[in-house]
Amino acid sequence: MNAELRGTEWEIELGNHLRALRLRMDLDQRQLAARAGVGLNAVKNLESGKGATVRSLIRVLRALNRTDWLSALAPQVTVSPLQVLKAKHPRQRAARRRPNLGKTHV
């Protein structure tokens, strides 16, 4: 896929991939919808690039045995070993911001 695609173009591209995968599995849209536990319109909307809910997308990807696509969308966050070595204590939470009380430092 081209990294320069815009939102709608990405939806259309994803829809094309879903349609091609469904056809390779010799399923019609109704069969895929039934397997995924989603409405027929959800499958039609996904394939046409009109979008659907994230839940519907996940169910369709599971039905198509392509949950690996989800890993590409949201890779697991890892910590660099160098960051661990540099840190005295591993961070447990984000730093708390102190409110500016109008004091100026001179």
Image (cartoon, rainbow, N blue to C red):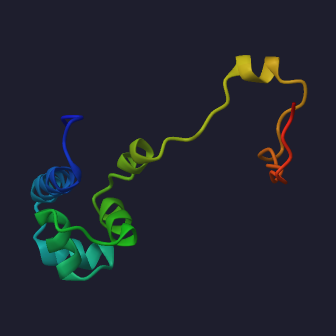
Image location of residue 55, percent across then percent down: 40, 71
Image location of residue 24, percent across then percent down: 11, 53
Question: Is residue 83 depicted above or below 23 in this figure?
Answer: above
Q: In this view, does 98 lie to the left or right of 16?
A: right
| Quarter of the image where one finds residue 22 | bottom left
Viewport quadrant of the C terminus: top right
Q: In this view, does 76 lie to the left or right of 94?
A: left
Viewport quadrant of the N terminus: top left
Question: Is residue 53 depicted above or below 23 in this figure?
Answer: below
Q: Which residue is drawn at 40% across and 50% down?
A: 70
Q: In this view, does 52 lie to the left or right of 84?
A: left
Q: Which residue lies furthest to the front in this view?
A: 106
Q: Which residue is drawn at 86% across and 46% down?
A: 103
Question: Is residue 12 depicted above or below 40 in this figure?
Answer: above
Q: 100 or 74, which is in the foreground?
A: 100
Q: Which residue is drawn at 18% across and 35% down?
A: 2
Image location of residue 47, percent across then percent down: 14, 64
Q: 46 or 66, which is in the foreground?
A: 46
